[in-house]
Each structure stands twice: as C-alpha cells, then as structure tokens.
Image (tube, rainbow, N blue to C red):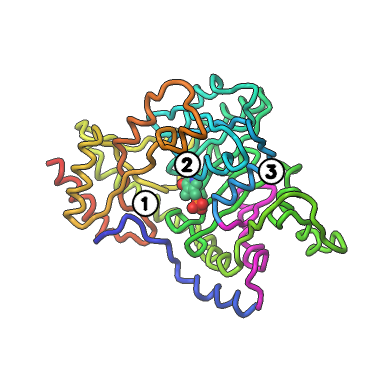
Amino acid sequence: MIPFNAPPITGSEIEYMQSAMNSGKLCGDGGFTRRCQQWMEQRFGSKKVLLTPSCTASLEMAALLIDIQPGDEVIMPSYTFVSTANAFVLRGATIVFVDVRPDTLNIDETRIEAAISAKTRAIVPVHYAGVACEMDTIMALAQKYQLYVIEDAAQGVMATYKGRALGSIGHIGCFSFHETKNYTAGGEGGATLINDDHMVERAEIIREKGTNRSQFFRGQVDKYTWRDLGSSYLMSDLQAAWLWAQLEAAESINQQRLRLWQRYYEALQPLAASGRIELPYIPASCQHNAHMFYIKLRDNEDRSALIAWMKEAEILTVFHYIPLHSSPAGQRFGRFEGEDNFTTRESERLLRLPLFYNLSDNNQNTVISSLLSFFS
Ligand SMILES: *Cc1c(COP(=O)(O)O)cnc(C)c1O
C-alpha cells in the first residue's frame, strides 16, 4: 500500500533527542527550543518565534493576544481546518466565512471588504497548500479598517509571498509541525510568529501560564508572578530536538518535495491539456513549498470513482475539508457572507495525491501510471 502521507525523517532525530535526554532538561524552552526559534527568526524574519504544542495552540494564543471578546467577528475562509475557527470561537467570536478563489482555494481577497462590519476584529488568511493568499490586499484592508491579520500558515512553512516568508506578514503567524505537514516535531507541534514588537512580551506571558517566567529565566526580573490570563503553550524540548533535525535539513526537504511536486505536474500535464483534470495554479507572486499536490476532477462522482480505482491499486488518495459553514458547529458559530460560488463546488472535486519527503520515485511512478490508466 502506498500511503497518502508518512512523517518526514532525516536520520538525525534520534541523536538530537538523545542529546536532549543527556542535557537533563526536557521541559519547554530548553536548548533545542532556543535553537529552533532563533533559526526561524533569522530565516523567516519574524520578531519573535515561540514553539508551541500545535498550530491549534498557536491560533488559540493569537486569539488571546488580540483580546477577542464575545460578539467579535473574525473573517476567514470556510474551506479550512476546524482549528482556524475554533481558536476564535473559544473566545466567543462569531466566524464570518468568505468564499475562496477557484484557482488557489485561498480566501477571495476581493470579497473580504463586503464582510467587514463594526464588530470585525481580525482576518485569518489560510495559505492553502503552502500557496500564499493575496497578502498585499489583505494587509491594506486590515490597515484601512484597523483589523488584525492572523496568518494560518500551518501548511506554509518555507513558502513565500513576494519574497516574504508566510507567517511573517500578518501581525501573528501560526505554523504546524504535525506529522502531516512538511516538517514535524515528532508528530505534533507548532510555532507562533509574533511580527508586531508590541505583542512580544505579552505573547511570552500568555504562553507561560500568564506569568512573566520567561523574563525571570532571562534574569530581567527577580521573581515571577501571575500577570495576565494564559495557558501552557510550550513544546517539550524532546520534541524540539526532533524538530531541529528537520529544520537543519529544511532546504533539502523543501527541494525534494518541490521535485516530487514538479514530477506530478509534468506527468499529468497531458491530462490537463485534454481537459480531463485541472492542475494546481501558483500565482507569480508565490513561491510555494510543495505542501500538497492536488488535482481537480469534474465532480464528486468522478472523484469517488478515482479514489476507488487508486485504492484497488493499493494507493491512498484523499479529499480534504468539508466546508466549515456546512458543518453543525459551523452553522452554530458562524455565517457565510456573500455567495458560496466555489467553496462547496471546488471542495467536492479536489483530490490529494501521496506527496511526502520519503516518497520514492518508484512509488510515485506507480501513482502516476495508475492515475493515467484510469483516464485511458
Ligand atoms: C494542520 C492544520 C492546522 C492544525 O495544525 P495542528 O498542528 O495539528 O494543530 C490548522 N490549520 C490548517 C490550515 C492546517 O492545515
């Protein structure tokens, strides 16, 4: 069976985890956490990067940091993972869903303004498949209406928009190091990128259970106390050790993924040319990170037939999000603003192919030939 995903493994993980064990400090903010955070600050140009247990936790931190209150509205696409919405619903916000663009499946930047009300506090662009949303337009809207921008860059690590790292453009960015993402911290993990100087101190406090323990550890205060609301949003240093092995190899992991992505793209070009499928579109302003390779079929029925065909060939291909606005919780906590022209339609015909760091060329060839044979 060719799996849909396998966690990336570089080979150095065990050595670094052993080293973390030998250091006698496994809790958060140890040596490996610092290394990972500094590497990301330098590489992505963020003011402060804080490792967290997950992107879900990072999104929750973001909602706390911008003081979301009951009744506030937060704008995001409906075509996203539940955590994008939950983080704000947990603070009492109402989610306002906006349609996606059919070409990238990212929030349609031209439809955001009509969804802004007096209660709107934030826009949450989700960089689907590691392809950037139209951030210049989104940031300009945020400035015009005094809103925060929280980037859900769970899938966007190492991808850029006009040369700027995803996650470093909005006020706050959120990364995922879940095993299904391009880099993992041993299965689960995340990072919060603080791009606004004024938020750094409070971000550290919220992450440390509402205390100024981070300042205490740096010797900036002589005791630490409860300062604000907060929770425990630290990653274990054992996981940071695993993550360090991946960040050290980030360039080669990225190149390998892009190579696999390109192989799919070229091999499937004839199917696209004859109108049998659609291939992903990458706007000129975006350098993507090959987080995902998807194709679009004619409709849901075609997609089900192809999934079954591939399964018969022992290959797992999977669809993606059920739009949040059509789910029971989405209906309870949110509303769709404007027409759903593309969210439902595109979500029903999108299919993701196996793409992961350790996928062999041989196995990829099998996926490609099984796919071609379905259409011949
Ligand atoms: C994976 C993902 C998340 C959640 O990441 P976790 O690290 O599993 O919490 C959130 N948003 C998007 C868009 C994702 O793809």
* Other-residue count near label 2 (Cα within 10 Å), few / some / many at <14 / 14–19 / ≥20: many
CA gap, disc 1 and disc 2: 14 Å
Residue 65: mark: 3
Q: Residue at x 46, y 35 (%)?
A: 330
* Residue type, numbered disc 2: Gln
**x, y (%) of residue 232?**
65, 58
CA gap, disc 2 and disc 3: 29 Å
Q: Residue at x 35, y 45 (%)?
A: 293
* Residue type, numbered disc 3: Leu
Is the C terminus in the top left, top right, bottom left or bottom right quadrant?
Answer: top left
Query: Is residue 155 something that shows in the picture?
Result: no
Mark earlier in primary sequence (1, 3): 3
* Magenta residues, start to end: 24-53
* Other-residue count near label 1 (Cα within 10 Å), few / some / many at <14 / 14–19 / ≥20: few
Q: Which residue is mark 1?
A: 259
**x, y (%) of residue 101?**
42, 28
Q: Secondary structure at mark 1?
A: helix
Q: Secondary structure at mark 2?
A: strand
Magenta residue check for 332: no
Mark earlier in primary sequence (1, 2): 1
CA gap, disc 1 and disc 3: 38 Å
Mark earlier in primary sequence (2, 3): 3
Q: Does ligand 1 reach within 8 Å of label 1's beta carbon?
A: no
- Disc 2 to disc 3: CB gap under 8 Å: no
Q: Does ligand 1 reach within 8 Å of label 3's beta carbon?
A: no
Q: Which residue is mark 2?
A: 287
| Viewer-side residue, 128 vs 357 | 128
- In the displayed structure image, the side of residue 268 where residue 154 appears, left or right: right
Query: Is residue 98 something that shows in the picture?
Result: yes
**x, y (%) of residue 6?**
37, 60
Q: In which quarter of the view is residue 364 placed?
A: bottom left
- In the displayed structure image, the side of residue 242 where residue 119 appears, left or right: right
